[in-house]
């Protein structure tokens, strides 16, 4: 039996401003720092012990990981940071306000851009200074595999090598793993782990700063799944995520 805990980073500054964030390296808001501390305290109180941890290479996930492990008094835990756990790349939408886009293009179109399984957003130009090939943190990644815009399907495909080669074998060996990442990279893991349909994953909302615990057997079948913490707060944060991209 192994345990996997997934935590979406605390609210970021652009979450607060309701912007498409993607790979833009936005930091946590003050509320996000509080959410991360609460997640760490929840995990400490749960008594869960982790063998290893993972984050993306974006500061909102890295900082959330720091705050969580500090609250647990486990700053020494091994950590692997991987670009494969980055948020879904929102292409040319990055930085734009979701509500404004819903008013301009309609809520249905924005929902497709935000949540579609296989429809990517408008692509970022390959020569745009914001393209990840110009970012030093990706200097060891072949430029042609760095995204200019991703659907969830492409995010799953980007995440898969890390899952199959590192995380999955550790879980199958009975290790307990903590992953602190992003709404869509975590949806990619959830879809893979639960074999969810493209229709079901479209409606899945991952709240910020709430630990999601999976208990898994040796073949990675899910034997138990639960969000940890105050259930009313969890419901409120899920509803907040679901409301993004609406006109009101």
Image (tube, rainbow, N blue to C red):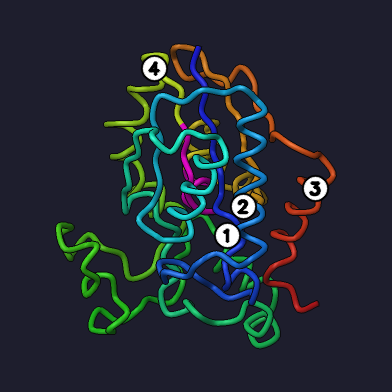
Quarter where residue 78 is shown: top left
Alpha carbon distance from label 1 to label 3: 23 Å
In the picture of the structure, the residue carrying the numbered disc 3 is 233
**Mark closest to the chain's N terminus, 4 or 3:** 4
- Tell which tag, 4 or 1, sits nearer the viewer: 4
Q: Position of residue 5 (x, y in %)?
A: 54, 33
Contact flag, marks 2 and 1 (Cβ < 8 Å): yes
Q: Which residues make up the magenta segment?
A: 178-188
In the picture of the structure, the residue carrying the numbered disc 2 is 202
**Mark closest to the chain's N terminus, 1 or 3:** 1
Give the answer, above or below, for where 134 lies relative to 169.
below
In the picture of the structure, the residue carrying the numbered disc 1 is 115
In the picture of the structure, the residue carrying the numbered disc 4 is 172
Front residue of this view, candidates 198 and 65: 65
Quarter where residue 111 is shown: bottom right
Q: Position of residue 180 (x, y in %)?
A: 48, 45
Q: Name the residue furthest right.
A: 232
**Mark closest to the chain's N terminus, 2 or 1:** 1
Direction from residue 244 to residue 248 in the image, left or right: right
């Amino acid at each position: 039996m192994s345990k996997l805990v997934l935590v979406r980073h605390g609210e970021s500054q652009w979450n607060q401003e309701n912007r498409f964030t993607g790979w833009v390296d936005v930091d946590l808001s003050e509320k996000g720092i509080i959410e991360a501390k609460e997640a760490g305290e929840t995990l400490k109180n749960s008594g869960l012990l982790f063998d290893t941890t993972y984050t993306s290479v974006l500061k909102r996930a890295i900082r959330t990981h720091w705050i969580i492990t500090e609250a647990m008094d486990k700053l020494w835990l091994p950590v692997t940071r991987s670009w494969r756990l980055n948020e879904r790349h929102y292409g040319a939408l990055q930085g734009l306000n979701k509500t404004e886009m819903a008013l301009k293009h309609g809520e249905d179109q924005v929902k497709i851009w935000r949540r579609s399984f296989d429809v990517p957003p408008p692509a970022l130009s390959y020569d745009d200074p914001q393209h990840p090939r110009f970012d030093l943190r990706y200097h060891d990644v072949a430029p042609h595999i760095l995204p200019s815009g991703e659907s969830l399907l492409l995010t799953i495909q980007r995440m898969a090598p890390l899952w199959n080669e590192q995380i999955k074998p550790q879980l199958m060996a009975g290790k307990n793993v903590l992953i602190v990442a992003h709404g869509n990279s975590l949806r990619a893991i959830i879809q893979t782990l639960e074999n969810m349909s493209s229709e079901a994953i479209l409606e899945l909302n991952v709240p910020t700063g709430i630990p999601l615990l999976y208990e898994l057997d040796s073949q990675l079948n899910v034997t138990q799944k639960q969000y940890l913490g105050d259930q009313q707060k969890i419901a409120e944060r899920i509803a907040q995520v679901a409301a993004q991209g609406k006109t009101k």
